[in-house]
Image (cartoon, helix red, strand yellow):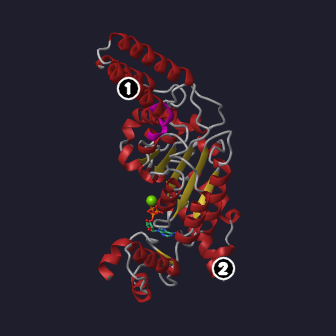
Amino acid sequence: MLFVLASAFISVALLFRFPSRSASQGNICGMKPKKRQVSLCLLLLLCLGGTTTTEAIEPISTTIAVGMAAALTGFLATYQNIFYTFHECCRTEWIAFNKTGLRADLDSKLFGQHIASRIIFKALNGFLNNENPKKPLVLSLHGWTGTGKNFVSKMIAENIYREGMDSKFVHVFTSTLHFPHLSHNITYKAQLQQWIKGNVSNCERSLFIFDEMDKMQPGLIDSIKPYLDYYDKLDGVSYRKSIFIFLSNAGGESITETALDFWKAGRGREEIELKDVETALSLSVFNNNKSGFFHTSLIDKNLVDFFVPFLPLEYQHVVQCVMAGMRDRDMDPDADVADQVARDLVYFPKSERVFSVKGCKTIDSKLDYYT
Ligand SMILES: Nc1ncnc2c1ncn2[C@@H]1O[C@H](COP(=O)(O)OP(=O)(O)OP(=O)(O)O)[C@@H](O)[C@H]1O
Ligand SMILES: [Mg+2]
């Protein structure tokens, strides 16, 4: 009997071989026991069971045990996917683009960013529906503080990864936290390359978010240029299905200038188009010697697919943010409170009070005070 149970155990262990790694995906989740492996296990099980039967003192119970062990092995072989249900894996159960979810989030939760909303949806939809992209998707989000750059990155993660920002396939680098010292630039470059290579080897559908690009040491980001380029594979790793998002305030002034010009000319904000800001934006980012993009080959070599401008937010958007904040807290949205919070913020230019200096950034903490 013991012998039979031991054989069952060996069979199951052979089937799953924890914690080995699959060659194709590099992580445990990519493992699929082949049919031949399953048959081999069953054969081994039956042979061992058969041997035991001849020596058995209780042939009936031994036969039952063999049957049960075989059934268990078969069950595990068929229902191996149960494992993937509980353990985040680089598989479609965990990573799948929710197109309608992203559309709905952008339309209902992101305020005052018609250009960003349109570009981001089109870029992601096109990229994630392409089975064979030529290069990874590279988005660079620019704009004034508190206009929604991190907020949108979170939306993107949540509509691709079931675990959202907590997914182990979503990686956030913050310049001031991860790359604080100028003198360590050489080490950072090597680390950055290793991180990206290691993570993409583990899951080709990885998302990398580089926050505070304007505070990154110039030159550092160039170390990842090869990964963003048009290569089939580099050292056996394909980066073509990954997504890179850069966030920065760089270029915020040029976007604001355009928005202010439209406002002064009495033109609607919605009339601002990408072409009105794009060239000035990429130039000002490229030429800003304090930014991580300063003279970077990523821009020079056109590896950034989309420069996404975030417009400065106006009073009406701040009101929308406050109302959304109240809904998030399960409070009844109160227009008077929203108006009061929005009126108490600082706006620029000082005389006209058009754009919120901090965008919607401090709204959440303000709500504690006003409610
Ligand atoms: N356009 C927006 N629509 C809705 N909510 C917004 C918008 N912009 C900002 N918010 C709210 O303000 C919070 C802070 O915004 P977020 O962190 O995205 O700003 P940011 O653009 O990354 O600013 P910074 O450049 O200072 O990092 C968000 O969590 C969100 O609640
Ligand atoms: Mg931010």
| Residue depicted at 65% across the width and 54% down the height | 125
Height in image: 338 above or below 92? below
Q: Is the magenta stretch mostly helix, strand or loop?
A: helix
Counting labels gives 2
Residue 258 appears left or right of 53: right
Tell me the element at label 1. Answer: helix
**From this viewpoint, is residue 354 visible?**
no
Residue 227 appears left or right of 165: right
Amino acid type at circle 1 is: Ile
Residue 268 circle label: 2
The magenta-colored residue range is: 76-82
Tell me the element at label 2. Answer: loop
Residue 23 appears left or right of 258: left
Amino acid type at circle 2 is: Gly
The residue mark sitting in front, 2 or 1, is 1
Mark 1 close to ligand 1, CB under 8 Å = no
Residue annotated with mark 1: 64
Q: Nearer the viewer, residue 22 or 229?
A: 22
Residue 335 appears left or right of 278: left
Residue 254, x across and y down, in percent: 58, 64
